[in-house]
Image (spheres, helix red, strand yellow):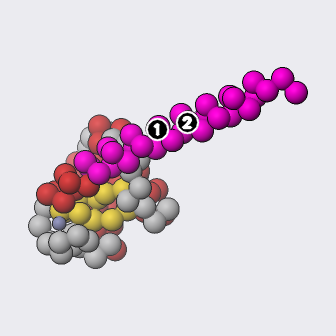
Amino acid sequence: MSKKEKARGRKRRQALLHELGEKCVWCGTTEKLEFDCIIPQGDKHHRKDAASRMTFYYAQHRLKNIQILCSEDNRIKSIIDARFLEELRKAQAAAAQRQQDRDDVPF
Ligand SMILES: [Zn+2]
């Protein structure tokens, strides 16, 4: 990534932090802030480069799905998120099974 892109990414990050209040919504600290998807979207975006990550966060922000957490609280939230995604997958599998069962009815 070029210097210019890096600078632009930093600027967008600062702008979004500013818009969201520049503090952890759980504990109020202004240190080590991170963006968090309120309804978890998996962790694929964590492996993207910084610019793509910011594009992802802005898209989520338009859906009102971004909040600021400090790194410590974000670690706790990610444990909750993992549990949430596990339950979501189970619920979706159960729903798909119900659909299947309905489709199996011969009339
Ligand atoms: Zn916090």
In the rendering, at what x and y percent does residue 3 appear? 22, 48
Q: Residue furthest right?
A: 107
Task: Quadrant for residue 83, please give it.
Answer: top left
Residue under circle 2? 94
Q: Confirm if mark 1 falls within 8 A of ligand 1.
A: no
Residues drawn in magenta: 78-107
In the rendering, at what x and y percent does residue 19 appear? 34, 74
Q: Image point 60% across, 38% down: which residue?
A: 95
Q: Confirm if mark 2 falls within 8 A of ligand 1.
A: no
Residue 46 colored in magenta in the image: no
Q: Looking at this view, is 34 or 38 the one in front?
A: 38
Residue 101 colored in magenta in the image: yes
Q: Image point 20% across, 54% down: which residue?
A: 76
CA separation in Å, label 1 and label 2? 9 Å
User: Callout 1, which amino acid?
Assistant: Arg
Tag 2, which secondary structure? Answer: helix
Q: Is the C terminus in the top left, top right, bottom left or bottom right quadrant?
A: top right
Q: What label does residue 89 carry, if any? A: 1
Q: Looking at this view, is 84 or 30 the one in front?
A: 84
Q: Image point 46% across, 66% down: which residue?
A: 64
User: Callout 2, which amino acid?
Assistant: Ala
Q: Is the N terminus in the top left, top right, bottom left or bottom right quadrant?
A: top left
In the rendering, at what x and y percent does residue 80 appear? 29, 51
